[in-house]
Image (cartoon, rainbow, N blue to C red):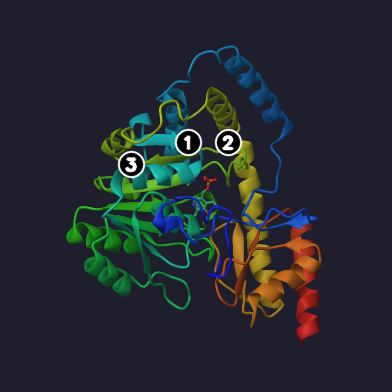
Amino acid sequence: NDSTTRNAWDDLPIRDELRGQSPYGAPQLDVPVRLNTNENPYPLPDALVDRIAERVREAARNLNRYPDRDAVELRTELARYLTRTAGHGVGYTNVWAANGSNEVLQQLLQTFGGPGRTAIGFEPSYSMHALIARGTGTGWISGPRNEDFTIDVEAARKAIAEHRPEVVFITSPNNPTGTAVDADTVLALYDAAQAARPSMVVVDEAYGEFSHHPSLLPLIEGRPNLVLSRTMSKAFGAAGLRLGYLAADPAVVDAVQLVRLPYHLSSVTQATALAALEHTDTLLGYVAQLKRERDRLVGGLRELGFAVTDSDANFVQFGRFADSHTAWQQILDRGVLVRDNGVPGWLRVSAGTPEENDAFLDAVRELKKEHD
Ligand code: PMP
């Protein structure tokens, strides 16, 4: 939205900081191949769909009652999943869940950010961090990255020392670049953040399961101000479920109780998530296949002569384009929807099924031919 665009809400008495802003808006277009929102391309297997129906049926019998406000059974199963797959033992008192990790992040900013406080992220990164900051009245500081999209540790340390933010976001693997952050970098930024003031460091590991590297979860040990955020939207193929969770010191879980809405996780959501967690191994099998497809996209794009950022996620950033919006449109004209995240010169493609990825590679091959 530039200043000449009129919004329907311009005459409403909305908060000043929302004036002239645009809502989150990945286009939901009806095209044959949609590789734009980092969804998992595999529908849930039939056995899991049946199990969801069963568990939801049980939950439906009690829909006259409010759900378990503390979602203890679900948090226990999420803790078990992390303990088994993320290299560190946690219990349900370390875990909190909400409607998508977006809501987890919102609760964290409601608790630790807010008016008069600031949060920093290293951009380009997940645009919702800044949007949720705005929505919660938290000031936003855009920290730097290196040319290759890794975090510039020295510059990041300086920015933290200068601005003394109450919340530091570290996205690993990062969206939209796919870049993983190593443990040493997280530790350096955690120490810098604690030296500036006691502040919360939030590691957003929405794509953690797709990484070539182990989870950063073990770093929460002995670091009460470190929070790891995860989601069932990507690895569990359940973006429609809306289930995100965090792992941290139990004090953090207690603190977010101050802002969570009562009964925020419906009984239907809790039942569905529990059913999905029963099928973890099958779903992680799809993750393994998607990782291979992701690596194939990286290789295929490089072979075609594109620049490609190393990816630890279920998507790939590729370029460089003189005008990425035009390139986005040209790929769309060939029936493939990718994402223009507004990073000049770059586009992002999510790893789909082998057939979808072939269609994408065909489309960009044609694009390349036309330009040569
Ligand atoms: N963090 C990152 C880095 C993401 O890319 C996304 C989704 N695109 C989310 C969090 C939020 O996902 P959800 O609310 O579906 O858990």
User: Mark 1 or mark 3: which is in front?
Assistant: 3
Graded by Cα atoms within 10 Å as few (under 14), some (14 to 19) or many (20 or more), the crowding at tag 3 reads many
- Mark 1 Cβ and ligand 1 under 8 Å apart: no
Q: Callout 1: few (<14), some (14-19), or many (20+) C-alpha neighbours within 10 Å?
A: some
**Is 181 in front, or is 147?**
147
Inspect the image, locate mark 1, and give the three-letter code of the amino acid beneath it.
Tyr
Q: Tell which circle, 1 or 3, labels the residue nearer the N-terminal end.
A: 1
Q: Secondary structure at mark 2?
A: helix
Residue type, label 3: Ala
Task: Kindly identify which residue carries mark 1.
Answer: 81
Residue 247 in view here: yes
Give how far across and how far down residue 371 sits, in percent. 76, 85
User: Residue 248, which numbered label?
Assistant: 3
Left or right: where 45 falls relative to 224: right
Q: Which mark is residue 280?
A: 2
First of labels 3, 2 by sequence position: 3
Mark 2 vs 1: CB contact within 8 A = yes
Measure the C-alpha gap from mark 2 to mark 1: 8 Å
Identify the image quadrant of the C terminus.
bottom right
Q: Nearer the viewer, mark 3 or mark 2?
A: 3
Residue visible at 49% across and 29% down in the picture: 265
Mark 2 Cα-neighbour bin, 10 Å: few <14, some 14–19, many ≥20: some
